[in-house]
Image (spheres, rainbow, N blue to C red):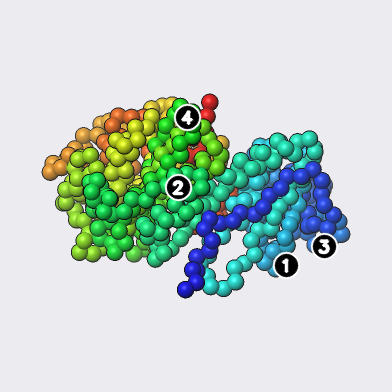
Amino acid sequence: MRNSLPPVPTKLPELEVVAATRRGLPLAVLIAPAEAEEGAAYGSSGRTAEVREVPENGDGPRWVAGIGEGEPKDFRRTGAALARALREAAENRPIRTVQVVLPEAATAEHTAELAIGLSLGGYRFVVTTTEPKPPVPAVRLVVAHERAVPAYADAVARVRVLAAAAAFTRDLANAPSNVKNPAWLANTAAKVLGSTVDVTVRDEKWLADKGFGGVLAVGGGSASPPRLIEMAYRPRGAKKHLLFVGKGITFDTGGLSLKPADGMHLMRTDMAGGAAVIAAMRAIGELKLPVRVTALVPAAENHVSGGSYRPGDIVRHYGGQTTEIGNTDAEGRMVMADALAYGISQFKPDLIVDAATLTGAMKVSLGLRTGGVFATEDDLAARIVEAGARAGEAWWRMPLVEDYAAGIEGELGDIQQAPGGPGGIMAALFLREFTAGLPWAHLDIAGPARADKTYDDVVPGASGFAARTLVEFAASYEG
């Protein structure tokens, strides 16, 4: 039977940095509002991300794209808009290669940001048996100075790895859950990462033998048993050891605390945190960062059956700590708790970062384009925010309010899973109980992990948020 999924990982458009145009290839030029006279000839104002297709005019440009104030973020947005325009044009008339002429003042950073936009702006994930639509054409980035080509090419090559991480995260999160069960997610990770990162897949028998009570409880209601995806990147001479943990709930019905029907279809992306961790590990290995990173993704499907866990149950996690269940829809923290406790005990990391679509409260707090950061140390929080800025992803630090910590103390178990109160903070305080006092940051990406409309380099569906931040964060320890 033909697999109707598109190829995973998605193949990004080819990009090449050159110093001269090639006769006969369609041309796009970038202009700023200051170049009003030139832009007016093509009906362009030069505003950021404004793309105009020009009627056939001999050797002149076919597309004119505005770059606004010419900041790096403007180049990224314009690259994304241009990618969408090129994809649309290719659907109407075959186009294999396009050349984009950059302004003379464009730096390597500008070129790299344009490359990110071109790589991700035309992303598409459609499950279909019809002939797939043409991809974004290959792009030649024409820079002003030949001597700059090697440095610019290196910058583009690096951000291409980051773009591939975001696209792979989107692929995994967009995949429909009738295909994407825990075994599929684990096997896909092993297949894609196998050449750069060691991947070990732990099955339900191993999880039971080791006492992963949270993962087994959440996964107990599904016909698809849970998995633990264990990834290890161990370069020689690494002085820092990071532990990443990502939530891998491949579909979330809410369990017996059933979610409303409206919006449940989006729960195929409830493993976006785990997808970001998997994709980040691939990128870290490809970039050969001199930092040791271990990553864990507990994967389970939170379903409804006679095997489902119940409100009022007491669940024993890896390491022995017990949790009193208040709401089976607070399942992410249950699987994350096991992975955190196991990762710390087994691998002895220097610090921990977890990523999860954990709480709806975070969408209320920060909206749909900003991730929440909870951290036990100021430096750790600052590193993540700065890594996000370099990656083009926005983060905001949230408080770990100690006055609320007593609220998670259990009555029938050690701690309560869903005690009420401010949802994002209480979930973070719950996870902190499993971090053994190590430096730790929790990234709640419930808002920005999904998009319902196009913006910047994001298209509707899974956004790929957090993967690039995790890579840039690991890279911050290179020195």
Kindly identify the residue that appears in the image at 66 percent across and 63 percent down: 88
Q: Nearer the viewer, mark 3 or mark 1?
A: 1
The location of residue 472, given as percent across then percent down, is 52, 36
- Asked which quadrant contains residue 347, the reply is top left
Kindly identify the residue that appears in the image at 50 percent across and 65 percent down: 5
On the rendered structure, is 89 left or right of 350? right
- Asked which quadrant contains residue 185, the reply is bottom left
Kindly identify the residue that appears in the image at 50 percent across and 72 percent down: 2
The residue tagged 1 is 93
The residue tagged 4 is 238
Q: Earlier in the sequence, mark 3 or mark 4?
A: 3
Q: Nearer the viewer, residue 205 or 174?
A: 205
Discs 2, 1 touching: Cβ within 8 Å: no
The location of residue 428, given as percent across then percent down, is 32, 39
The residue tagged 3 is 56
- Residue kind at label 1, given as amino acid type: Arg
Q: Is residue 265 above or below residue 158?
A: below
The residue tagged 2 is 278
- Residue kind at label 2, given as amino acid type: Ile
Q: Nearer the viewer, residue 250 or 79?
A: 250
In what element is the residue under mark 2? helix
Q: Residues within 10 Å of mark 4 (few under 14, many from 20)?
A: some
Q: Earlier in the sequence, mark 3 or mark 2?
A: 3
In what element is the residue under mark 4? loop
- Residue kind at label 4, given as amino acid type: Ala
On the rendered structure, is 219 left or right of 186? left
- Mark 4 to mark 1 CA distance (whole Å): 50 Å
